[in-house]
Image (cartoon, helix red, strand yellow):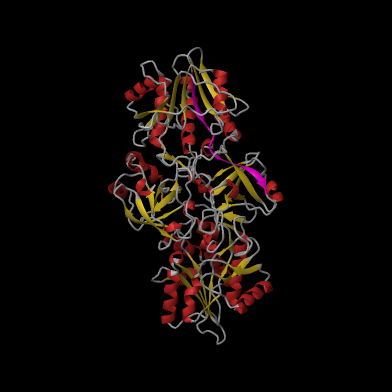
Amino acid sequence: MGKNMPLSIRTFAVLWAAAFFAGRIGGQTKLDLRGISSVPAVTGQELALSKELMEALKEFHPQTDNLGNVWVTSGSGAPHRLIATPIDEPGYVVSEITANGYLRVQRLPQTAPNAVFDTLNFAQPVVAITREGKTVRGVFAGLSVHLQPGRLNPPKMNHPEELYLDIGANSAHEVRAAGVDLLDPVTMWRSDAVVYDAATVGIGAAERAERQALLGLARAISECKAAGTTTVAFITQQWIGGRGLNRLLTEMAPDEMVYVGRVLPAPAEGQDSKAFEIDPRKGIVLGVLADYAGGAETLPDKLKTLAENEKITLQLIHAMPPRIAGYVKGASLPKQFVALGLPLLWPVTPAEIAPRADTLAMEKLLEGYLKIAKPVAEFGGGGLLGSERNDIEELTEVYGASGHEEAVRKVLVNRLPGWAQKNVTTDAAGNLVLHIGGEKRETNTPRIVFVAHMDEIGYQVKKIEEDGRLQVDVLGGGYPQYFLGHVVLVHKKDGTSVGGVLELPAGWDKAGFEFPNSARSMDEPAHVYVGTKSTAETEKLGIAAGDFVTIPKQYRPLLGTRANARSFDDRVGCAALLAAVRAVGPDLPGRDVTFVWSTEEEVGLKGAAAFAEQAAKQGRVPDFVFAIDTFVSSDSPLESKRFGDAEIGKGFVVRAVDNSNSVPLQYVDRVVALAKENNIPVQYGVTGGGNDGAVFTRFGSVDVALGWPLRYSHSPAEVIDTQDLEALGKIVAVIARQW
């Protein structure tokens, strides 16, 4: 939204907001592990969640139907009041399984919820849910920014026609062997569905928050003291025509109803009038229909009075009725009707925010409506058990944007063998340097340097705006839709972090909006919203200029030996050097080999350049530099195979040509020969981007860049095959001993 963000959003109540994003401290997030909140429920595919609800409510004799609606009822006689909330959320279903193991998808609902819904799913981690309820990890493919310069008519990444789901399979047979089949639902990975201390965030945040509120209400239904009959219902297929609601209204014909869900302002009545605007500062939304005339006996006014007595802030608006669409006229809403909803920021995007304080206020209001004396305690949470992790898992999950590699450097030192820890040093540029070899180098033995960079792409706080937002500069390059509109972490100087949201551009919710697809589009000014309304309030969170910002990430195994994580570029290179150091050991008599883990590669090869200049001053220019970095691969259904054609799982790659260097062919062939002699799978080819070795060539070094094939570079969807990492570590060790 940037500078055009509405005032009502910019001045959002800081009382909850400061706590909202403070839920993640020191990299630890308070997750909602209560099962029901984490079960995806793509509209029309809610069966798994319906089963979970039936189980959670089993002691209260729940009922269900063949649409998956779940409800509990207490009391008898009139009036019959219905409190209902939708449980479904937008997503996708598998619509095709290709011969080479990708899955095509169809969006549900088939009409996009907003202009950017599909766009914000490209290059993101997702999950597919099988018929048996098994979760299969995957990613939606995205373009690699390094492969697009000069390309004719690349995909726009804004339509399901271009969405391909990659679960790590090589064939349709492997897909089905994993349990995935046509019509299985697909939804965004729940990393962005974090329940912070004071807000629910991510796709479907409103549905999850409201569902949890009504679940507590349903479990307390036996304490209801209101006269008559009360039904608390969890309804399905609201996004595709309100089919679950239509069924319940037809069968129950309630006398009054509270619809707990997304409340949409009704259109303006005339050209000179304005539609109601929902203000995030003013509490939960009470929606009334066009014929509302007020009166002490009406349901809206009863709730208004209750709210006043309980000091609960409401904002009353004329609202659209819950959608009921079909080929024939649907059931009618009862005359006593009201819609109750949460004020949302960036609705139906990965950045959707449902304030926890408003969720609690909603629970309290409904308890008063049903005359429940006290709330039932929430379900207990849980913790995640730690486990021993290997190099690549540990390295990808540590954060370190360009110029902020301290935590990465610490992990690397800790994972080096003891002898290496005693000898490793950190130079003035922050590079981690380990030299191995005898005191005297043999005459015909070349001086060798291996270099892999520690940094990852991200943003850096440039300043705090007067309205509390963070103006940030980009560190590295990529497509903005992979990051804008998603949850981020602001990493503070004390090592802890604060959550936020990278704001969407102005006009994101207007028909026809498209993200720019140029290679430099990520360089445009961006802002992070952390829930505050002034510079002082943001500073109280401990945020300051110079802090860095990243998208949350996690190492996620896929099928077989494949895996997804952001920052494989270049943590795979870092891990390969670790493996080689262990394999080589402390003794390389007569040789001169240096391992360098460099800084700030993504912003101009700065760490490597500093090391190269210092080596030249000391008369230690390497004869050969082996830059160990990504081979950005076109092994993707979105890319042209003309360029960057190296398949993942087929071995390490000699990065023979890129934007910064061309390896003399005799050295390409020499690496290939060494690999074959040692039974190491190898590929070679041409790709885009630059490598750290390029800054050594002006001093006379030969740059022989090596890498591994990476899908969907510079995105949260990066995919590798760990067999390629193993091959890369082996060839580095061979070259250290034999080159």
Q: Determine whether 717 is above or below 47 in the image.
A: below
Image position, residue 450 (x, y; %): 52, 72
Residue positioned most to the bottom: 443
Q: In what quadrant of the picture does the C terminus appear? A: bottom right
User: On the picture, is 117 further left or further right than 734?
Assistant: left
Q: Which residues are magenta?
A: 81-97
Residue 360 figure quarter: top left
Residue 94, magenta (yes or no): yes
Q: Determine whether 342 is above or below 139 in the image.
A: above
Image position, residue 678 (x, y; %): 67, 72
- Of residue 135 and residue 639, the one placed in the foreground of this image is 639
Question: Which residue is drawn at the image coordinates 65% and 40% (left, top)?
Answer: 183
Image position, residue 502 (x, y; %): 42, 49
- Of residue 675 and residue 247, the one placed in the foreground of this image is 247
Residue 350, magenta (yes or no): no
Magenta stretch: dominant secondary structure: strand
Residue positioned most to the right: 173
Q: How many marks?
A: 0
